[in-house]
Image (spheres, rainbow, N blue to C red):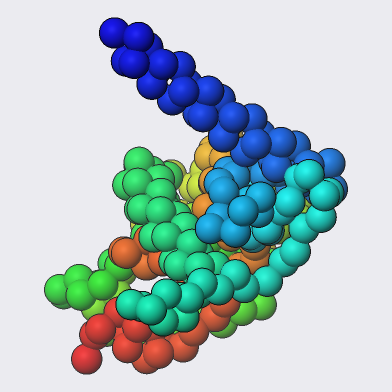
Amino acid sequence: MKKILSAAVLLITCFATTSYANDEAKAFVDELLPAHLKSKTAVETPVSGLYEVVLSNGDILYVDPKSKSFLSGQLMSFSEEAGVINLTQQKKQELSSLKNTERKAALADIDAKDKVTYSPEGEVKGRIHVFTDISCGYCRRLHQEMSELNKLGIEVSYLAFPRAGNGSAAHKQMNAIWCAGNDQERRDAMDQAKLSGGIKGSDCKTSVIEQMELGQNLGVRGTPAMILESGELMPGYRPAKELAKVLGIK
């Protein structure tokens, strides 16, 4: 019984020590970071005293809180069986997979009426969600290819991302698009805003700013930003035929 209690106390002590060290590593990093960044997780690496700290923007730092030092770069490991292993790359792949899953779940929760969707007349061979801004030149360029995208079997669902933020001219115009009534009326308003440079419309309560904030949380930093069915984020403009190749459409 005494041995069991001793083992339990040892386990609790080890856990508490590890937890304290992890918190210490995070606290050290948080002191260095600008206000918009925070540490998310901290775990000990195979290097004694060195902790891997993942930041809120997905970057990775390696920290020794005791010596108050850190480094940014690739952490490599070597074993006789596996050879050289890039531990940083492994972690980034793990984080990317988790983020893709998060994006898929977030997009699945958005009601169809809160999107502006352009569907092919025939078979849907692929779907993309696009965070867009009507004041963005490359967003307009992508929109000019909507007919070709639909002919290729690609369904495009727009989500709002007014880069200038709440109260901006882009926000007000995008709000008018989302207020435009039924699906076809919203598409007509989007076409007018992107192809002729602006619209006038009614004002109502919409999810435009919520969508922008969602995009930021999902890693969107500019427009257009496409999210594939896998949850992968693909920033920037791509021509229709290139998009079809990415989606495996021949």
Front position in the image: 106 or 90: 90
**Whole-percent x, y for residue 12 in the image:** 47, 21
In the image, residue 226 sits, relative to residue 173, either above or below, namely below
In the image, residue 165 sits, relative to residue 129, either above or below, namely above
Q: Dividing the image into 4 quarters, which one contains the C terminus?
A: bottom left
In the image, residue 174 sits, relative to residue 224, either above or below, namely above
Number of numbered markers: 0
Tell me the residue at 32%/64% (across/down): 230
Q: Residue furthest front?
A: 2
**Whole-percent x, y for residue 118 in the image:** 35, 66
**Whole-percent x, y for residue 141 in the image:** 56, 82
Tell me the residue at 71%/53% (across/down): 63
In screen coordinates, is 121 left or right of 231?
A: left
Regarding residue 110, the answer to whether it shows in the image is yes
**Whole-percent x, y for residue 105 in the image:** 35, 46
Quarter of the image where one finds residue 106: top left
Regarding residue 161, the answer to whether it shows in the image is no
Front position in the image: 81 or 57: 81
In screen coordinates, is 9 left or right of 205?
A: left
Q: Dividing the image into 4 quarters, which one contains the N terminus?
A: top left
Front position in the image: 36 or 151: 36
Tell me the residue at 64%/30% (across/down): 20
Tell me the residue at 20%/71% (across/down): 124
Front position in the image: 45 or 137: 45
